[in-house]
Image (cartoon, rainbow, N blue to C red):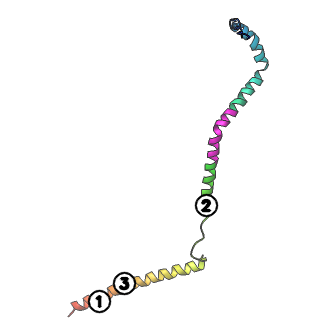
Amino acid sequence: MRRRTRKKAPAYKPPIPVSEPEVVEKEIMPFVLRHEEEIINYIKDKAIKETMKSLAPLLEKLEEAVKQQESAQVQAVIPEPPDTPVMNYEEQLKKLQEASTAKVKEKELKIMDRMNKLNARFGNIRP
């Protein structure tokens, strides 16, 4: 039988030392300065995309609410057809005149009734 041998663990390697800030600045800053506009535009685009993603549901709800409000306003503006037939000006004028003459006649009848009652009283007073 063969013996299985274990593989040896790799020797410990210390972590790579972090470079000094001066070294990082010397290496990265020229790159940043050369591509400053591209970096700014990239960051702006990413920010706009993420903002639009988060605002998309709210914008959809807002658009739906606006459509509902507009449809409600349109329905309120459109008057329902009247149940009674539409009369022209002359017919309306005749109806108003008839109504006013009827009221005047009622008042005349009331006045005549009062006058008759007063005359009857005066007639009872005189012997």
Q: Are marks 1 and 3 in contact (CB under 8 Å)?
A: no
Amino acid, disc 1: Asn
* Front-most of residues 82 and 99: 82
- The residue drawn where x is 75% and y is 9% is 26
**Residue 120 appears in which quarter of the rendering?**
bottom left
Residue extending farthest right: 34
**Residue 117 appears in which quarter of the rendering?**
bottom left
- The residue drawn where x is 74% and y is 27% is 42
* Front-most of residues 73 and 46: 46
Amino acid, disc 3: Lys
- x, y percent for residue 104: 44, 82
Amino acid, disc 2: Gln
Does 9 appear above or below 90? above
- Residue 110 is labelled as 3
* Front-most of residues 65 and 70: 65
Does 109 appear above or below 3? below
- x, y percent for residue 78: 62, 63
Q: Would you say residue 46 sits in the magenta stretch?
A: no
- Residue 119 is labelled as 1
- The residue drawn where x is 67% and y is 33% is 50
Q: As drawn, is 39 to the left or to the right of 60?
A: right
Q: Are marks 2 and 3 in contact (CB under 8 Å)?
A: no
- Could you tell which of marks 2 and 1 lies nearer the N-terminus? 2
- x, y percent for residue 102: 46, 83
Residue range corresponding to the magenta coloring: 49-63
Q: Would you say residue 60 sits in the magenta stretch?
A: yes
- x, y percent for residue 55: 64, 38
Residue extending farthest front: 1
Mark 2 sits on what residue? 75
Circle nearer the viewer, 2 or 1: 2
